[in-house]
């Protein structure tokens, strides 16, 4: 099985914090751009000790692409963009503050956890649609002994970890790594 390092993108631009940004193409904060270099160097050091990285794959959203590009320069590898690694699409909630969404919809956002196969923000995705697309990506990876880096988002990482570890959807939010953190999984045989 391929060894897959799921890396969450660095910190986003300050004016997006506290807002629902999902598939909105937001940029990184100044700290996030500096952190991208540190994350890349840390992963490159670890991987040089274990045989190196075969491939870098990234969500096409800018906040992931920036980190992937830094890693690509550091490791002299190309980056492949993979749409299935995008964050959840939150439909009409995109770009709005979470506080505003709560004021207007009450606890409707809990539908993503309590009814993951059917609840979707208007124009968005269900939790299980996100799960299905990221798991299809993971299952499409080659079954060999390569190391693959995938730069993605909190939602896809939670969906992959929750599915592989058998965690009920209610527990998925607790599986989210911090910005720039790495989670290791294996591709399916």
Image (cartoon, rainbow, N blue to C red):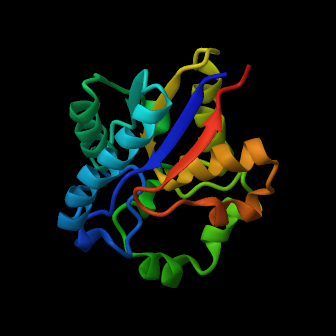
Residue at the image point whose x is 59% and y is 15% from the top: 142
Relative horizontal placement of residue 88, taking residue 19 as reference (left or right): right
Farthest residue toward the front? 49
Q: Can residue 117 be seen in this view?
A: no
Q: In which quarter of the image is the C terminus?
A: top right
Residue 44 falls in image quadrant: top left
Q: Position of residue 49 (x, y in %)?
A: 45, 34
Residue 46 falls in image quadrant: top left
Residue at the image point whose x is 45% and y is 82% from the top: 99
Farthest residue toward the left? 30
Q: Where is residue 9 in the image (x, y as percent from the top left)?
A: 38, 52
Q: In this view, does 79 lie above or below 107?
A: above
Residue at the image point whose x is 60% and y is 23% from the top: 2
Q: Where is residue 15 in the image (x, y as percent from the top left)?
A: 24, 73
Residue at the image point whose x is 78% and y is 47% from the top: 165
Q: In which quarter of the image is the N terminus?
A: top right
Q: Is residue 44 visible?
A: yes
Q: Position of residue 162 (x, y in %)?
A: 72, 50
Q: Which of 13 and 49 is in front in this view?
A: 49
Relative horizontal placement of residue 54, taking residue 155 as reference (left or right): left
Q: Total number of numbered labels? A: 0
Q: Nearer the viewer, residue 70 or 139?
A: 70
Relative horizontal placement of residue 137, taking residue 153 as reference (left or right): right
């Amino acid at each position: 099985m391929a060894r897959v390092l799921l890396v969450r993108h660095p910190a986003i631009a300050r004016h997006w914090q506290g807002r629902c940004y999902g598939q909105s193409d937001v940029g990184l904060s100044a700290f996030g751009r500096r952190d991208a270099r540190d994350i890349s160097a840390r992963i490159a050091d670890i991987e040089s000790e274990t045989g190196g990285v075969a491939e870098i794959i990234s969500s096409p959203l800018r906040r992931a692409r920036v980190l992937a590009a830094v890693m690509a320069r550091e490791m002299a590898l190309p980056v492949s963009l993979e749409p299935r690694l995008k964050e959840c699409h939150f439909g009409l909630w995109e770009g709005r503050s979470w506080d505003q969404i709560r004021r207007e919809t009450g606890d409707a956002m809990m539908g993503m956890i309590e009814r993951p196969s059917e609840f979707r923000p208007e124009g968005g995705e269900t939790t299980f649609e996100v799960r299905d697309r990221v798991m299809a990506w993971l299952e499409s990876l080659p079954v060999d002994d390569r190391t693959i880096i995938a730069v993605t988002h909190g939602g896809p990482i939670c969906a992959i970890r929750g599915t592989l570890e058998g965690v009920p959807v209610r527990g998925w939010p607790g599986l989210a790594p911090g910005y720039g953190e790495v989670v290791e999984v294996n591709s399916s045989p």
